[in-house]
Structure formats: structure tokens, C-alpha cells
Amino acid sequence: MQDHIIFLLYILLFIHSTIGYGFLFSRMVNRELLQSNLGYIGLIGFFFICLISIFSSFFIPHNFLHNSIFHVIGLVSFIFFFNKLKQFTEIKFLWLIFTILLLGLYVFKNHDDFPYYHLTYALNLSENGFIIGTGQFSHGFRTFSSLFYFHSILYMPFIDFYLFHSGPFIIILFFNFIIISKLFNNLKTGKINFIYFFSLLSVIFINIAFYRISEHGTDRSAQILLILIFIIFFEILYVEKNKNIILSKIYLLVIIVFLASSMKAIYYLYLTLLPIIFYRKKLFKEIFIKKNFIIILFVSTSFFLNLSVSYFNTGCLLYPAQKTCVIEQEWSIEKSEVERMSIHYEWWAKAGGGPNYISEIEPEIYVKNFNWLNNWIERHFFNKVTDTLLGIIFISLFVLTLFIFFSTSKKKTNIKVDFIAYIVPIIFLIEWFLNHPSMRYGGYVLFAIPIFLITALKLQILNLKKKIINILSIFLILLSFTLYNTRNIVRLTKEINFYKYDLLKSPYFFVDNVDTSLVFRENDFKIYSPKNNQMCWASKTPCSYSKNLKVKKFLWMDMVY
């Protein structure tokens, strides 16, 4: 029982601390952001914490003392702004959604990359701080994600690293709060348009398809953020007329794009939405005004820090793009290795290999000229893509049929969308298909967006009473929560039976006991390596799968080469 209390108190602390940092960031950047939905404030705080975590890791480990002070500041900020803004109703609603989604946070078995490097990467930051050249430990340590830095801030007394899987849960919590509270607010104000129905379809899809928090890794959280990016994009283009509100939403869009990009660099592509907005809304003069200086400074710093982490890990600004490996250093990954891994990732995304198969075509040839297409269709399109498509289409048809049943006739709508709403998601879907056609690299959401958009446009022309929309929306949201929890109950039942997960005794995920050997020692600095082909898990850090390493000082930091 004591472990369960500690578990719950800490996750609540981290959520409120994150919101507190969102308030702080909003106050520094633009006071109008303080009026944002509390879920958006939480995502802003998530971005700010990642930014602080990456910067501070270069100077100090994220140990118990550092993190305790950090979260005290976040909690004080939350209390101060909460009392000032009087958001009592919002915080109660957040607690309600937290309670509904909580079951998903209980995990015994995490995804396969978690023991390989996700857990170890974050734990190394907590125990040692940033070490230059960690890309030498294994190829897993070369792929940077801000989620690892966020998790390193969650290393606290009594709980240790047992909430290092909770970042995705916090993302899905804030996402649900944003969407559901927006739906209710729009119902009150009568703003029932295609964005309303698009948001409703999206929250249903995310709760059903992304129910398994342990499988999110660094990919699905960014995809959840991508839905918010498009919702804001549609709002700016087709709904908002007030220039101040538009600028505030542009701030939100930029922050969420940079947060998603810090998890997966491919999401920097979505910055291309900004020129479309500036052109359509004739806002070019407003880009570099003094009012925007602070937000430009922060996102520029985020971009610089993301590149710095990648560079100091691998010698490449954007690993594994060989062209970005500009200045070779002692810790740099060999360019031939970078090129090999770049081809490997593309080969893997295009279904060149998997647990039980491998293509006979050489990877360099396989990834070119659609040599991969037939195999991708056989291995990936069937059944990963088709299962997702069927789920998206089923949700769309179910919701559309339900609303049509209660409608009386069609009506004219004031909101019409042009070709941009259709063509932009399709362009990103084509880019995904040509370069990295794996569902984990954005496929789930990129298939959902155009289908949900078409469905939402059909729904907005139906003649429906406000009361009917309210009842059906609540029913569908509750149904999505029911399916979310049902699927998690089934998952936990399997984990209890198969893995002997004693959930009543402890809420913590499984960590294997790893036998390690000391592979390097100089003064107080040590590097360990797991024996018998084991994974690092939560063994002594830094943990490396490579044993032929040397260490020396680079500036004030330790450098592995």
C-alpha cells in the first residue's frame, strides 16, 4: 500500500509541477498564453522542462537534490498562478480525467527498447549528467529524444526511476483535457463546426488505439502532438479572425512543433505550416516584431540544444544524416557507420527485415527505386497499415452513422475549407510513404487526419440540435474511455497471469537484475557493461554495450571515445 501511495503522490506532483513550469514559461513569453486551456499550459510546461533538463544536464546530474528543488519551484509556481487565475473548475476536471486514465499508467512489461537504452539513457543523466560520446555505447544511445531528459527530472527519493515511463501518460492526459474541454466550451458557445467533429474523432481514436502507454516509446507521443498541430492549424486558417488570438495560437503551434521535434527530429517538417499561415493571414510584418523576440529566442535555443545533444553524442548534428557530420571529433561515429545506420533505418522502415524475416536484396539496393514496395505491401501494409485503416474507417463510419440517425436534414455551413486543408496532410503522408513508411514514424496519425477531416466536413452540414450533439459527444467520449480501460484491464490481466505481476503489492514495472563488469576506470569515473548478452536495464551507469572505450576530459565534461 505504501508503494501505491508514493506512486500516486509523485505522478500528481509531476503533473502539477509541469503545469507550474507552463505558467512560468507563458508569463515570460506572452501573458495571453496564461489564458490558454490548462492542458496547453501543461504541454508548454513539458516543453520548458525538456529545455531546462537538456541545458542543465551539461553542468549537473539530475539527482535527488537537483530534482527535489526543481519540482518545489514547479509546485510553487502552480500554486501561485492557480490562486491568481482561479482555475478551480479546470483543475477538478483534470483530476477527473487523470482518475479515468490512471489504469494505463500501471505497467509491468515495457517495450523492447526500454531496457535496451530508454531507461538507461535517462538514468545516466540522473546519476552522471551529460557524457560526451555516449553514442559509442551502442546505436540506441545515438538517437536523442527529449523524453529521456524529461524522465531524468522524475528521479526522486523513494520512487527512484519507476516513473521513467510516465512522460507519454502525461502527454495523453493533457491531450484528453485539451480536446474534451474544448468540445464542451464549443458546445456552450455554439461553435459546432468541422474542427469540433475532427477533435471528437481524434480523441476517440487516440484513446482506443494508443491505450498501451508502455508501447508509446518516443514515437506515439509525438503523433498525439501532431493531431494538436493540425487542430491549431485548422483553427488559425478557417476560424480565428482576431489577430491577437491568431498570434497566440501561432505561439502554441510553434511550441508544440518544437516539442514533437525534440522527441523525433522528423517533426521539424511541420514548421512548413507556418509560411502557409503567414501567407494566408498576411502576417509577415508581425513575425519579427519585438513582442515575438522571447518566443523566437526560446525555440531557437531548443533547436540549438537538440542539435548540440546529437552532435556531442555522435559527431552529427542530425544523426544518422551523414551530411550533418561536419566536423569530425574523437567521439564521432565513423562516417561509414553513420551511412550504414542511415540505410539500416530506412531499410527497416521499408520492411526490409523483422524478427522472423530478412530481405535477400542488399539494403543499399533494397531502399532505392521502389525495390522495397512489394515486400512492404506484404510485410507492413498487411496487416499493420490495413488494421489501422480499418480502425480509422470504422470509427468514422460509426460516428457519422450515429449523428446521421439523429439528424433531420442537411444545412448550409458557414465554414468552408479550401484545397489547403486536403492537400497539406496528403503531402505529409506522401513524404512519410516515400522516406520512412513505418507506422511508428507518424503513420497512425497521418492516415487518420485526412479521413477524419472528410468525415468532420460531412458531420458539420448535418442539422442537429445542440442537446443531441452534447449527448452523443459525451456518449462517444465515455465509450472511448471504456474501451481504453477495458483494453488495459485485459493487458494487466495477461501481465498478472503470464509474468506473475503482483499489482496489489507493487505498482512498479519490472526491472531485471543485470550482472555487469567494469570495463573502464579512471579515478572516480567508471563504465560498466552487461554480461552474457544482457541489456543494461537499471544497472550501474554509465552502461555500455561496447567495451573498447577510453575516457578523457573535454572542457568540464567526461568524453568517451
Image: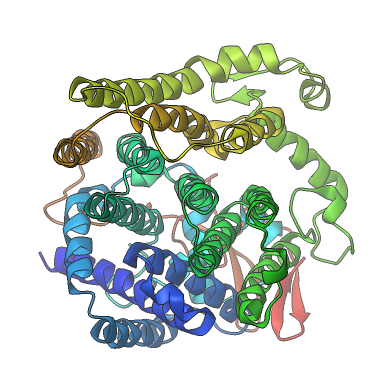
Residue at 49% x, 37% y: name it.
416
Image quadrant where residue 462 sits: top left
Residue at 71% x, 86% y: name it.
556
Judged left or right of residue 152, residue 554 is right
Q: Position of residue 285 (x, y in %)?
A: 72, 69
The foreground one among 511 and 307 is 307
Q: Which residue reaches farthest right?
A: 327
Residue at 54% x, 66% y: name it.
243
Judged left or right of residue 185, residue 258 is right
The foreground one among 378 and 333 is 378
Q: Position of residue 325 (x, y in %)?
A: 85, 57
Q: Is residue 132 visible?
A: no
Q: Position of residue 422 (x, y in %)?
A: 57, 32
> What is the number of callouts on the image?
0
The foreground one among 270 and 312 is 270
Q: Eyeballing the image, is 24 above or below 4?
A: below
Q: Eyeballing the image, is 163 above or below 179?
A: below
Rendered-image quadrant of the C terminus? bottom right
Which color mode does the image show? rainbow
Q: Position of residue 420 (x, y in %)?
A: 62, 38
Image quadrant where residue 6 sits: bottom left
Rendered-image quadrant of the N terminus? bottom left
Q: Is residue 317 visible?
A: yes
Judged left or right of residue 350, residue 443 is left
